[in-house]
Image (tube, helix red, strand yellow):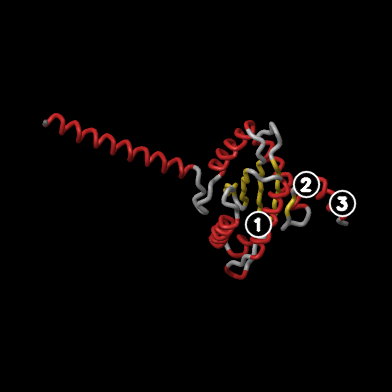
Amino acid sequence: TLSIGLAAVSSHRMNSYKRSTYAAIEALAKLSETAGLTGLYNRNGFDRRLREKMASLTHSSQDLALIMIDLDDFKQINDQWGHQYGDSVLVALANHLRTAVPPEGTLARWGGEEFIVLLPGYNLDQASKTAEELRKHLAEQRYAHDTGVTASFGVAVAEHGESCESLLRRADELLYLAKAGGKNRVASDHTALTKELAKTP
């Protein structure tokens, strides 16, 4: 009886140790994929989910859209009010994005003042419309010192057989075109924005 009791206690302790170890590993994994300031996924966390979704495209015909977001002239806010205030704006802005991004989307802080959104099942028109809604939503917000922040957006949809790196590069190129076109806008088509830029004196 004593042997059975000791075995039960030992088994309970071992199971408890396994559970606590597993919880610690899970916490570390989550920490490694989370941006400390905003609580959003960081680049590592987003990259893993992007690769999972891109891999699943080979087995389905579902669309997959990517929205890259870069805040306009954010350096001016840091220069004028300090980095601590700039961080508070980033936290508030991340919360605004979190509530505005569709529930099926994955939102991450890509780095600095850049954010990124992954939208499974969205074609170019749907993703562009979502990006425009996000753009308007951010432009309407006000922070301390009555400051506002706008953002530029690049929208790309994964092509069959495309790599993650290629999709990210296309979204980044479109974001650059939005910046070059005057900022606070969405670019989702090279040709259309190039024509618009050509009209600018």
In the foreground, 139 or 89: 139
Q: Residue at x 87, y 51 (%)?
A: 198
Q: Residue at x 62, y 45 (%)?
A: 118
Task: Give the side of residue 26 with respect to residue 44, left or right.
Answer: left
In the foreground, 45 or 148: 45
Tell me the kind of residue under disc 1: Leu
Residue 184, quarter of picture: bottom right
Q: Looking at the figure, which quarter contains the N terminus?
A: top left
Identify the residue position indicated by label 2 in the image: 189
Task: Give the side of residue 132 with respect to residue 3, left or right.
Answer: right
What is the number of callouts on the image? Answer: 3
- The disc, 2 or 1, on the residue closer to the chain's N-terminal end is 1
| Badge 1: residue crowd in 10 Å (few <14, some 14–19, many ≥20) | some
Identify the residue position indicated by label 3 in the image: 198
Q: Position of residue 96 (x, y in %)?
A: 58, 59
Q: Position of residue 187 (x, y in %)?
A: 75, 50
Q: Residue at x 56, y 57 (%)?
A: 99
- The disc, 2 or 3, on the residue closer to the chain's N-terminal end is 2
The answer to whether residue 23 is above or below residue 102 is: above
| Badge 2: residue crowd in 10 Å (few <14, some 14–19, many ≥20) | some
Tell me the distance, in whole angstroms, between the alpha carbons under discs 3 and 1. Answer: 26 Å
Tell me the distance, in whole angstroms, between the alpha carbons under discs 2 and 3. Answer: 14 Å
Q: Looking at this view, name the residue that lies furthest to the bottom.
A: 146
